[in-house]
Amino acid sequence: MKKYLPIAFVASCLIGILTGCATNDVFEKNVKIKDQQWNAADRQSVQFDIEDTTALYNVFITLRHTDAYKYNNIWLNVYTKAPGDLKGTRQQLDLTLGNNDKGWLGSGMDDIFYHRIRITRDPVHFNKKGTYDFALEQIMRDDPLEHVMNVGLRVEKAN
C-alpha cells in the first residue's frame, strides 16, 4: 500500500493543477484581412453572446501585422450594438503598437507581431443577455492600410 502512495499523490496533484487552471476567456475572434490590405470601407464584424449580466468584463482589440507595417499606432472606429438596440455607439481609438525606443510592443515571432490591447480603462458591465455586435473600421490616412494580417476582439471576465 505504501508503494502506491507516491503515485496517488502525484496523480492528485496533476488533477488539481489541470482542474485549477480555469480560464477567464469568454470570447475571442480574429478576422483575416484579405491580402494584408485593410480598406477603410471594410468594417470587420464580430458577434458574441453574453449570458452572465452580473459579471464585469475586460474588452481587448487584437491585431496581427507584419514588421513592414509603417506606423507606431492604428486609429480605429469601434462600433458596438447591444441586443435589441436599434442604434449602436461609436468609439474612436488610437492604439499604440510600438515606439521608436522599444520597437513593437506586442509579442513577435520572425516578422509577425501580435497585439492584445485593452480598450476600456475599467471593466465593463454588459446589461443585457444576448448577442452583441462589434464592428472595427480602420481610419488611418492610408487606404488601403497595408501589412495588417488580422484584427479582432477578445472579451474576458475580469478578476
Image: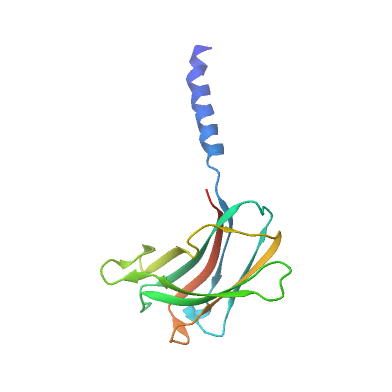
Residue 82: percent from left, percent from top: 67, 67
Vertical comparison of 6 with 88: above or below: above
Residue 93: percent from left, percent from top: 47, 74
Out of 53 and 16, give the one closest to the viewer: 53
Q: Relative to residue 131, is residue 58 drawn left or right? A: left
Dividing the picture into quadrants, the one containing residue 30 is bottom right
Q: In which quadrant is the N terminus drawn?
A: top right
Out of 73 and 10, give the one closest to the viewer: 73
Dividing the picture into quadrants, the one containing residue 47 is bottom right
For this orientation, the residue located farthest to the right is 84
Q: Relative to residue 79, is residue 75 drawn left or right? A: left
Out of 109 and 54, give the one closest to the viewer: 54
Q: Which residue is drawn at 47% across and 20% down?
A: 6
Q: Residue at x 74, y 69 (%)?
A: 84
For this orientation, the residue located farthest to the top is 1
Vertical comparison of 70 with 107: above or below: below
Tag count: 0
Q: Which colour scheme is used?
A: rainbow
For this orientation, the residue located farthest to the left is 101
Out of 40 and 2, give the one closest to the viewer: 40
Vertical comparison of 137 with 61: above or below: below
Residue 38: percent from left, percent from top: 50, 81
Vertical comparison of 138 with 9: above or below: below
Residue 114: percent from left, percent from top: 43, 65
